[in-house]
Image (cartoon, grey):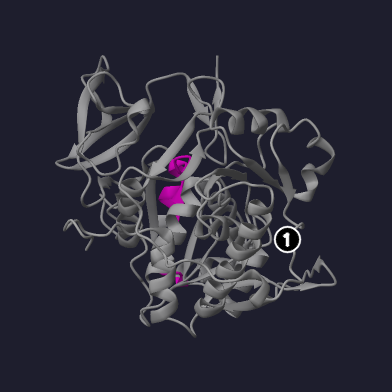
């Protein structure tokens, strides 16, 4: 509790500290083994415990604090950064622990000019970039640092210590994500406040509730840490002390998937539906892969809707399919009922949310579509700049209520489609 009696808000960092204490020697991550800087192709992984993860984050926080303060970039400043790997996670969490605000951008953005525009809109004080951006970084107007520029040779004594972790204020900005630019043609900035992150932890904790009989799941990286899907999921899995495998790439092969199952103990598969569908198609011709998929306690997909043919095939063959519906502005919003019943694929809002489904479109055959609207009293309602004049956030996502409180997603009320990584494209 705070001095005025308000409950402390939970953040990604407080989850890390709590889990590092509770699950210190347990495996937090399995990361691809590298030899002489080159990733091996034999699908082997190195272990990172929860205690080591916390120690790594704190060291990276001290390193980045040293670098940024040397350029008179004070704590509380916004720092732009991309990320997919475990090392990227250390940079992101480290910068956050050092007291800065990570502004996360995708390495899939078309060119550095888009990144420069995004950091100019937030008045970011610095940009941290992958070496692959090195040739195109000359036009950046703020101090910029390669991820390889940290002074790793400095001792712990030289780096000093971090101040105690503080609970964030409800309106303090913790992260800045960006949308795909589906409605304006350019990405929109999505500031994530302390109150919003606190509820993300609560929602992701529900989604990541362990399915394994042991109580500790082994799951897999879903995508870029700069997209809300992976950041959302990782908070929930950290909260439960689960193990997360970093694959060689987002669209990892069926062979790599089977190695994760047999060598790492993977029991929960999380991927965008496009990539999961590829595994399903492969499993139609590979009985051993089908058996491995049937062994999984959960196959969770997000992004694009699963093609009906693939969904029907999965249920027919006893695959434990789950769907989470979400967006950058709100995070995860709805999850499927699951199970083997005829309603398994229907979606329900996550506990604690305050949504409404407003009649939007009616077809000639009498079917009624409703738009999902996030009410201002819902803790995951985005900042006011995203809300309409009525104070609500109108998602533009259409649903049909199949039975009370259970919905089927029916597309959007505009002319945009989603790509395989949930980025939208104009169809006009």
**Other-residue count near label 1 (Cα within 10 Å), few / some / many at <14 / 14–19 / ≥20:** some
x, y percent for residue 108:
66, 39
Give the residue drawn at x 67%, y 56%.
Answer: 249
Give coordinates of residue 248: x percent, y percent: 68, 61
234 over 160 or under it: above or below: above
Residue at the (59%, 51%) spot, across then down? 278
Q: Residue at x 25, y 39 (%)?
A: 407
Residue 111 in the image, given as x and y percentages of width and height: 72, 31
Q: Provide the secondary structure element on which disc 1 rests.
A: loop
Q: Residue at x 56, y 35 (%)?
A: 419
Q: Nearer the viewer, residue 238 or 67?
A: 67
Q: Quadrant of the C terminus?
A: top right
**Picture quadrant of residue 137:** top right
Q: Nearer the viewer, residue 407 or 307?
A: 407
In the rendered image, which quarter is residue 217 located in? Answer: bottom left
Which portion, as a residue range, is magenta?
A: 295-313
- On the rendered image, what quadrant is the N terminus found in? bottom left
Is residue 300 one of those drawn in magenta?
A: yes
Task: Name the residue carrying label 1.
Answer: 150
Q: Is there any visible trace of residue 318 in the rendered image?
A: no
Q: How many numbered discs sit on the rendered protein?
A: 1
User: Taking 253 as reference, is 220 left or right?
Assistant: left
């Amino acid at each position: 509790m705070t001095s005025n009696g308000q409950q402390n808000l939970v953040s990604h960092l407080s989850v890390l500290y709590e889990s590092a204490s509770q699950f210190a020697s347990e495996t937090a991550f399995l990361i691809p083994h590298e030899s002489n800087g080159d990733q091996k192709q034999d699908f082997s992984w190195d272990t990172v415990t929860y205690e080591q993860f916390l120690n790594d984050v704190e060291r990276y926080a001290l390193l980045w604090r040293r670098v940024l303060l040397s350029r008179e970039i004070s704590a509380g400043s916004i720092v732009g950064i991309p990320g997919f790997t475990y090392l990227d996670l250390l940079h992101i969490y480290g910068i956050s622990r050092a007291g800065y605000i990570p502004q996360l951008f995708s390495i899939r953005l078309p060119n550095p000019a888009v990144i420069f525009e995004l950091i100019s809109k937030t008045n970011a004080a610095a940009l941290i970039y992958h070496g692959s951006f090195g040739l195109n970084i000359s036009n950046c107007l703020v101090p910029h640092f390669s991820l390889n520029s940290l002074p790793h040779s400095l001792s712990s004594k030289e780096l000093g210590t971090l101040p105690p972790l503080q609970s964030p204020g409800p309106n303090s900005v913790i992260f800045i994500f960006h949308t795909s630019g589906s409605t304006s043609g350019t990405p929109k900035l999505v500031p994530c406040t302390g109150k919003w992150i606190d509820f993300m932890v609560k929602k992701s904790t529900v989604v990541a509730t362990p399915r394994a009989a042991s109580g500790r799941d082994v799951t897999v990286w879903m995508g870029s840490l700069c997209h809300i899907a992976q950041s959302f999921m990782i908070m929930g899995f950290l909260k439960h002390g689960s193990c997360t495998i970093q694959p060689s790439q987002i669209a990892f092969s069926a062979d790599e998937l089977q190695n994760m199952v047999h060598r790492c103990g993977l029991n929960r598969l999380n991927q965008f539906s496009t990539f999961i569908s590829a595994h399903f198609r492969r499993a139609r011709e590979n009985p051993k892969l089908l058996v491995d998929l049937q062994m999984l306690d959960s196959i969770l997909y997000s992004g694009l809707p699963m093609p009906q043919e693939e969904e029907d095939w999965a249920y027919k063959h006893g695959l434990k399919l789950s769907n989470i519906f979400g967006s950058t502005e709100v995070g995860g919003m709805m999850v499927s009922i699951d199970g083997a019943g005829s309603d398994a694929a229907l979606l329900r809002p996550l506990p604690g949310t305050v949504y409404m489904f407003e009649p939007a479109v009616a077809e000639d055959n009498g079917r009624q579509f409703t738009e999902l609207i996030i009410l201002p009293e819902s803790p995951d309602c985005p900042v006011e700049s995203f809300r309409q004049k009525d104070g609500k956030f109108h998602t533009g996502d259409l649903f049909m209520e199949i039975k009370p409180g259970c919905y089927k997603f029916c597309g959007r009320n505009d002319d945009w489609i989603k790509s395989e990584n949930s980025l939208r494209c104009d169809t006009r």
